[in-house]
Image (cartoon, helix red, strand yellow):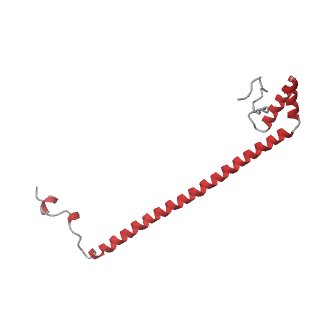
Amino acid sequence: MTPGHPCADAPATAAPASARPLQGPWRPLLPVLGAAAAVIVLLALGAVWLARERQVELETVRLEAVATLRAQQVAAWVAQYRAQFRFLSRTPLWPDLLARWQDQGDDSARAWLLERTREYARGNGLASLHFVDVRGRGLPLDDGLAPT
């Protein structure tokens, strides 16, 4: 090494600064600093745990609210279709037309029943409406094919 080089002035056996034991007036504070660091870590862990518990609680409340809403929607849906069924089953137009078509073979009753059925389905937001006989079989109202 050349004289004047920064490493030339340093003793060859000098230990790096990180390997030297801590010295100085603040050495007695090391236990206090260690304890403070431990307390900070514990407080941080406690805060994380509390935040997680709060999130679990919020998600539980949200899930219960969604479940309640879905249950109300299903109940409203069932009530709506039950009311439609009651209306259809108590209106004499439908059974009369059905009897004329099934018992008497009246094709004009079938055509009128098909027209009224389509209008009712459109007016109530239904994709289709089918009739079943007393044995639970679908009646071939439209195009001569019974619904499956």
Is the residue 75 above or below the residue 142 in the image? below
Image-based side of 35 in relation to 74, left or right: left
The percent coordinates of residue 91 (x first, y second) are 87, 38
Direction front: furthest residue? 135
Residue in the foreground of this view, choosing between 23 and 117: 117
Q: Quadrant of residue 139?
A: top right
The percent coordinates of residue 92 (x first, y second) are 89, 36
The percent coordinates of residue 81 (x first, y second) are 76, 42
Residue in the foreground of this view, choosing between 70 and 44: 70
Is the residue 91 above or below the residue 73 in the image? above
Q: Residue drawn at (43%, 65%), measured in percent from left and top? A: 44
Image-based side of 41 in relation to 82, left or right: left
Q: Residue drawn at (73%, 34%), measured in percent from left and top? A: 127
Q: Residue drawn at (33%, 72%), measured in percent from left and top? A: 33
Which quadrant of the figure contains the C terminus? top right
The percent coordinates of residue 131 (x first, y second) are 78, 32
Q: Residue drawn at (16%, 59%), measured in percent from left and top? A: 6
Q: Quadrant of residue 118?
A: top right
Residue in the foreground of this view, choosing between 71 and 126: 71
Residue in the foreground of this view, choosing between 123 and 9: 123
Direction left: furthest residue? 2
Which quadrant of the figure contains the N terminus? bottom left
**Number of marks in picture:** 0
Is the residue 25 above or below the residue 83 in the image? below
